[in-house]
Image (cartoon, rainbow, N blue to C red):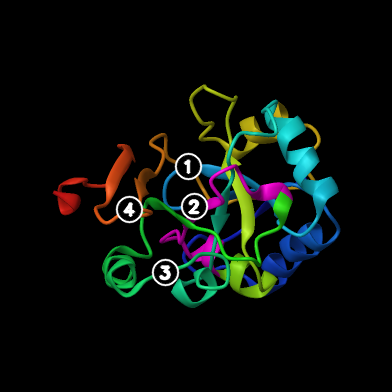
């Protein structure tokens, strides 16, 4: 099912439909400030298994926590003062930051290093969605594993027939987030993406 949502002024009743799908254990597709994402409830193991299966990813491949704001991030990641200042300056924005996980993170989402990748997209739909849902959406890029992301919501709907819902917020981007590791004293750019990396020089 595809539902159109105004990208500038998301309609609350439509956001509520997407939240209901997440709460029912469905995997949904939704826009961010970079590419479209596939996401589900981080507290629902069956939904996470479905997400991996839809994307044809191995279960040791990391997923991102898409949060509403910095306050939401603090429950799932350990954020020191220096890290907080950097995050406050750059978020919301097209970054995924790798941080040490807190004990709140479900064990099935933890890799050996006990780290999480967290982002706060600069996108009205994803922000309203995570705010209404009340917890992060565990996510991956809406595209074939290792391939280019899909930009057309109808194309996403066709490519992933097991989706509970596709939010159409207009054409998506093709450039993924910039991934930055903040688990050491100096930020390390793991992947250059849609944002300027010179801020970490």
Magenta includes 119?
yes
Measure the C-alpha gap from mark 4 to mark 2: 27 Å
Label 4 SS: loop
**Figure quadrant of residue 70:** bottom left
Instruction: Residue 3: give x, y in percent of width and height.
Output: 69, 52
Q: Which of the labelled discs sits on residue 35, or is there none?
A: 1
Q: Is mark 2 on a helix, strand or loop?
A: loop
Magenta span:
108-127
Q: Which quadrant: the N terminus?
A: top right
Q: Mark 2 or 3 closer to N-term?
A: 2
Q: What element carries label 1?
A: loop
Spatial separation of the CA atoms under disc 4 and disc 3: 12 Å
Q: Mark 2 points at which residue?
A: 32
Residue 37 as seen in the image, left or right of residue 41:
left
Characterize the local packing of mark 4: few (<14), some (14-19) or many (20 or more) Cα atoms within 10 angstroms: few
Is there CB contact under 8 Å for labels 2 and 1? Answer: yes
Residues tagged 2 and 3 counted as in contact (Cβ below 8 A): no
Which residue carries the number 3 mark?
79
Residue at which label 4 appears: 184
| Structural distance between the alpha carbons of marks 1 and 4 | 28 Å
Give the quadrant of residue 61. Answer: top right
At which x and y percent is residue 200? 19, 51
- Above or below — where is 141 with respect to 115? above
């Amino acid at each position: 099912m595809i539902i159109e949502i105004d990208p500038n002024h998301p309609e609350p009743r439509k956001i509520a439909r997407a939240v209901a799908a997440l709460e029912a254990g469905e995997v949904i597709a939704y826009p961010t400030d970079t590419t479209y994402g596939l996401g589900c409830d981080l507290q629902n193991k069956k939904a996470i298994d479905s997400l991996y299966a839809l994307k044809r990813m191995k279960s040791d491949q990391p997923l991102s926590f898409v949060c509403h704001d910095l306050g939401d991030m603090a429950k799932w990641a350990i954020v020191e003062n220096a890290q907080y200042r950097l995050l406050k300056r750059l978020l919301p924005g097209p970054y995924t930051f790798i941080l040490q996980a807190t004990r709140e993170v479900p064990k099935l989402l933890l890799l050996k290093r006990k780290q999480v990748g967290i982002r706060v997209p600069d996108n009205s739909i994803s922000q309203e969605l995570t705010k209404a849902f009340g917890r992060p959406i565990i996510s991956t890029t809406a595209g074939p594993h290792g391939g280019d992301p899909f930009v057309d919501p109808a194309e996403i709907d066709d490519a992933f027939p097991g989706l509970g819902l596709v939010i159409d917020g207009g054409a998506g981007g093709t450039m993924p987030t910039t991934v930055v590791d903040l688990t050491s004293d100096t930020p390390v750019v793991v992947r250059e993406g849609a944002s300027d990396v010179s801020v970490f020089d």
